[in-house]
Image (tube, helix red, strand yellow):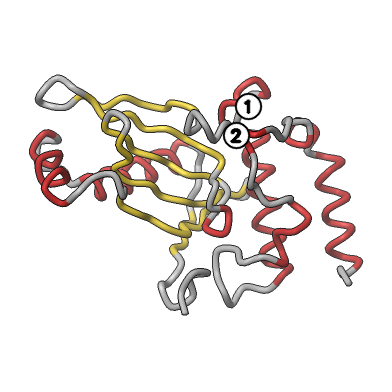
Amino acid sequence: MVSTTAVAAIKEWRKTNKFICHVKLTGATEGLVNFEDKPFKAYLNKKMSKRAKLNIAHGALNFIEKTFLPEALPQLYDMKAFGRSLITIPLKNGTCIDVKLLASPFQEEGELMLLMFLGDKRVYSICFSCTEDGRAWIGGIQGGKDIDNEEVKALTKELYGIRPKNLIITLLYGFLSHFNIKEIYAIDSHYHVKSD
């Protein structure tokens, strides 16, 4: 049975978050966890209380609604297109890395995801949640399965010696700083939702 405080918080969220409530759930958003289920699913940290999960999820969705224009939300939630393009980073050889922002398909690790692509190959991704009160939780960072170590070394040279993992973390810090996020928490691997 859901506690009355959780039910009240969900109802309050629905009243104040009109745009996100009207994002059409289609094949593009298939697999996203319903907001009401977030406190009861694995989310960010194995040791986190249901109330803390709900507060972070609520704050994260408020952040998304207040930060992005309503017309940008369908792009952000478009899983097939890997979200909304943010920046293109030129490489020495004339090609480029594309960085996109997506409503995370791995929602247990955060509501948002920064993705770094080299062509159609995912190089790195980082999942996180931001709240409107200036806090962020980094729930996961992962190298791409489409790219091997030799390609990462070559990419590092093309990035003038900057490692792709360092670059995506720097891009996340820039994103958070731009939106005045001052407190950043990273989930310890012992408490990660996918750890044993």
Q: CA distance from mark 1 to mark 2?
A: 5 Å
Residue 179 lies left or right of residue 98; in this view the side is right
145 versus 40 height, above or below: above
Q: Residue at x 53, y 45 (%)?
A: 112
- Image quadrant assignment for residue 92: top left
What's under tag 2, amino acid-wise?
Tyr
94 versus 164 height, above or below: above
Q: Residue at x 86, y 68 (%)?
A: 2
Residue 7 lies left or right of residue 80; in this view the side is right
- Image quadrant assignment for residue 75: top right
Q: Position of residue 49 (x, y in %)?
A: 68, 73
52 versus 31 height, above or below: below
Q: Residue at x 8, y 39 (%)?
A: 157
Residue 74: numbered disc: 1
Q: Position of residue 138 (x, y in %)?
A: 46, 57
> For numbered disc 2, what is the local secondary structure?
loop
Q: Position of residue 195 (x, y in %)?
A: 46, 74
- Image quadrant assignment for residue 98: top left
Residue 77: numbered disc: 2
What's under tag 1, amino acid-wise?
Pro
How many other residues sit within 10 Å of disc 2, few (<14), some (14-19) or many (≥20)? Answer: many
How many other residues sit within 10 Å of disc 1, few (<14), some (14-19) or many (≥20)? Answer: some
Q: Position of residue 64 (x, y in %)?
A: 62, 38
Q: Residue at x 63, y 28 (%)?
A: 73
Q: Are marks 1 and 2 in contact (CB under 8 Å)?
A: yes
Residue 136 lies left or right of residue 30; in this view the side is left
